């Protein structure tokens, strides 16, 4: 699955003869402001692999500081299936770190300026890789920002100016935005105020580019744009829903560190890790490029972890202006499709953006869940003996369907003929540390955690997150993202004016909201042992905590500070809402009337 960090005794003796080496990208013609081609990168990475890896000291790859213009001609082509992204293979990758061991990539302030739908860095089948001091941006992001210069509510027209560098063209009266690798006429987007906060109570705003007139001063006027929230000086990030390319993708790798990395845009998630173990994010920033006047950063989540294990340690980061969450940690349920015999099932990935990556292997602990009730089936824990793709020769070729065999006979009710079932891999589930981060001015939610192992969400600032700040979910019906949380501590965080817009799962600032179609039939709660302690809620509305399907909830020693920045609007007028919960110990926050 991954390159192993361990060495046999004989290999270790050979390794002692190796000495760490330093590779300068500039020696291969890869220099800021200079033309180079993909073959130069291929040669560089081949030489690093051929040099071996010292078990005591890492090899180093040094990029000189400066701006690197990266287009398709500098990229390699890969068929990579990436969780929660569009599977529009092949993909173009600038720096594919494949099969690397014990390597530090020191960017020293290098700035990758991308032209096209490109993955700047891919870490695949590698062990002990660190990337530091790197900045990434797109010259022309496929997400297009416009600024409103005039709004005529009576005439239902909006006049706007696209951000500098935007290319446009018409088909009849419909306006299109275009750039390297994209052309779109978005039907809506996210509305930002002049200060960069997302406009109050706007969510996803429709925007009609179907009847547009070009003006002599470089602005455009759109007809039939009726929205009472629109006013001059606002900015709208007009977006499609595609996710072709994360900024940094980590797959089937171990002991990966990203340190002081800044991503101004990614055409998907900023950082996406799948089927990997022990990942550290230290001082990672996913933030808009304000020097270019932008208020948006990534097309989707800032960071996303799918089917990982070990520890996800994310601290001292900054996540601003994303079109989705700051962090999302989950596994993936396979849907049980057929019971072959007492030890064999046929199962499948179900979501169109999540397949073709490693789900598990021999020896993994698994369990089963009733999808409609989101209820773990007692006595269903088992051990995976094998997993074989049914629709492709190999998993990484885009497999969706599998035959799974198990160490023990399956209970009789593990049968899809008796109701919808999901299978969860308990081995590939990580511990999470989310510490000292700032999350601000983003669409949707702040932090999502769906893992049965320890979660520590501490000492973070959630500032103007437009949806809920922290969400514990679980879903075996739509995205098929696992699963049950069993040990979560949400402590010493500041929640400042969150929940300004209604999105999915926005029942409260902190929301425990698994998707359970038949909650009334659930016998045992999904989540357990959740503590919400010593936090400060600065807010304009009352819903602070919403909990559904929890056994063991503690809410204590929190403080509420009334904000007058916005008017209360939420349908939920209770500070605490409970549904199908038990063993609850909740204290009203200080300062809440």
Image: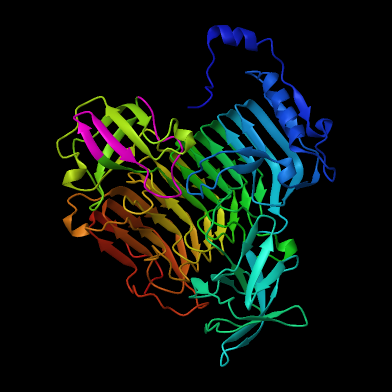
Residue 508 falls in image quadrant: bottom left
* Foreground of the two, 120 or 551: 120
**How far across and how far down the image is residue 431, in percent?**
43, 39
Picture quarter with the C terminus: bottom left
Q: Hey, which residue is sitting farthest right in the picture?
A: 34
Q: How is the image coloured?
A: rainbow
Q: Magenta part of the protein: which range? A: 338-362
> From this viewpoint, which residue is outermost toward the bottom?
154
The residue at the far front in this view is: 172
User: Can residue 459 be seen from the camera position used here?
Assistant: no
**Along the viewing direction, whichever of 411 and 21 lies nearer the viewer:** 411
**Residue placed at 59% from the left, 35% from the top?**
123
Against 59, is 503 above or below?
below
Residue plotted at (62% across, 46% down): 283
Q: Residue 129: in sight, yes or no?
A: yes
Query: Which quadrant holds residue 110?
Result: top right
* Depicted 497 relative to depicted 242: above or below: below
Q: Residue at x 24, y 56 (%)?
A: 581
Is 189 situated above or below 224?
above
Q: Main secondary structure of the magenta part?
A: loop
- The correct choice, above or below, for 524 with respect to 462 in the image is above
Residue 344 colored in magenta in the image: yes
Image location of residue 481, percent across then percent down:
38, 48
Left or right: residue 321 versus residue 380 is: right
Q: Position of residue 109 (x, y in %)?
A: 76, 44
Question: Residue drawn 22% across and 26% down?
Answer: 408
Query: How many marks do you count on the picture?
Result: 0
| Residue 312 magenta-highlighted | no
Q: Is residue 427 left or right of residue 14?
A: left
Residue 42 in percent (x, y) is at 71, 31
């Amino acid at each position: 699955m991954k390159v192993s960090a361990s060495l046999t005794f004989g290999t270790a003796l050979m390794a002692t003869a190796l000495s760490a080496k330093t590779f300068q990208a500039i020696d291969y013609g890869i220099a800021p402001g200079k033309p180079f081609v993909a073959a130069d990168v291929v040669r560089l990475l081949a030489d690093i692999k051929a040099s071996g890896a010292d078990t005591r000291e890492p090899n180093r790859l040094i990029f000189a500081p400066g701006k690197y213009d990266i287009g398709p001609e500098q990229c390699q082509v890969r068929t990579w299936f990436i969780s929660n992204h569009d599977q529009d293979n092949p993909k173009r990758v600038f720096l594919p770190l494949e099969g690397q061991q014990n390597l530090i990539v020191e960017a020293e302030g290098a700035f990758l300026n991308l032209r096209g739908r490109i993955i700047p860095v891919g870490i695949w089948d590698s062990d002990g890789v660190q990337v530091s001091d790197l900045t990434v941006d797109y010259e022309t992001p496929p997400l297009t920002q416009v600024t409103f210069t005039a709004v005529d509510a009576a005439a239902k027209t909006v006049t706007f100016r696209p951000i500098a560098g935007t290319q446009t063209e018409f088909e009849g009266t419909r306006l299109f935005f275009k750039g390297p690798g994209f052309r779109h006429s978005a039907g809506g987007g996210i509305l930002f105020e002049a200060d960069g906060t997302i406009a109050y109570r706007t969510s996803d705003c429709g925007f009609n580019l179907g009847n547009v007139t070009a003006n002599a001063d470089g602005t455009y006027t759109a007809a039939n744009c009726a929205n009472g929230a629109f006013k001059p000086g606002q900015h709208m990030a007009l977006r499609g829903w595609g996710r072709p390319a994360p900024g940094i993708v980590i797959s089937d790798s171990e002991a990966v560190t990203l340190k002081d990395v800044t991503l101004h845009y990614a055409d998907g998630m900023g950082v996406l890790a799948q089927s990997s173990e022990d990942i550290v994010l230290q001082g990672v920033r996913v933030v808009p490029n304000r020097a270019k006047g932008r208020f948006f950063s990534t097309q989707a989540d800032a960071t996303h972890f799918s089917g990982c294990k070990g520890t996800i340690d994310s601290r001292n980061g900054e996540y601003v202006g994303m079109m989705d969450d700051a962090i999302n940690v989950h596994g993936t349920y396979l849907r049980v499709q057929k019971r072959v015999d007492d030890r064999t099932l046929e199962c499948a990935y179900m979501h169109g953006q999540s397949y073709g990556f490693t789900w598990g292997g021999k020896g993994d602990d698994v369990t089963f869940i009733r999808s409609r009730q989101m209820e773990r089936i007692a006595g269903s824990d088992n051990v995976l003996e094998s997993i074989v793709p049914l629709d492709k020769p190999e998993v990484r070729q885009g497999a969706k369907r599998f035959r799974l065999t198990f160490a023990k006979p399956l209970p009789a009710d593990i049968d899809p003929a008796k109701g919808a079932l999901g299978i969860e891999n308990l081995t590939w589930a990580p511990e999470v540390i989310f510490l000292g981060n700032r999350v601000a001015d983003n669409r949707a939610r702040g932090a999502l955690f769906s893992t049965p192992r320890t979660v520590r969400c501490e000492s973070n600032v959630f500032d103007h997150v437009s949806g809920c700040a922290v969400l514990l979910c679980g879903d075996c019906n739509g995205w098929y993202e696992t699963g049950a949380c069993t040990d979560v501590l949400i402590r010493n965080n500041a929640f400042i004016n969150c929940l300004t817009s209604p999105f999915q799962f926005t029942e409260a600032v902190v929301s425990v909201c698994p998707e359970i179609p038949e909650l009334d039939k659930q016998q045992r709660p999904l989540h357990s042992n959740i503590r919400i302690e010593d936090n400060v809620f600065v807010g304009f509305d009352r819903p602070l905590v919403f909990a559904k399907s929890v056994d063991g909830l503690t809410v204590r020693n929190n403080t509420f500070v009334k904000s007058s920045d916005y008017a209360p609007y939420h349908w939920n007028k209770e500070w605490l809402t409970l549904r199908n919960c038990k063993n609850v110990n909740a204290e009203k926050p200080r300062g809440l009337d």
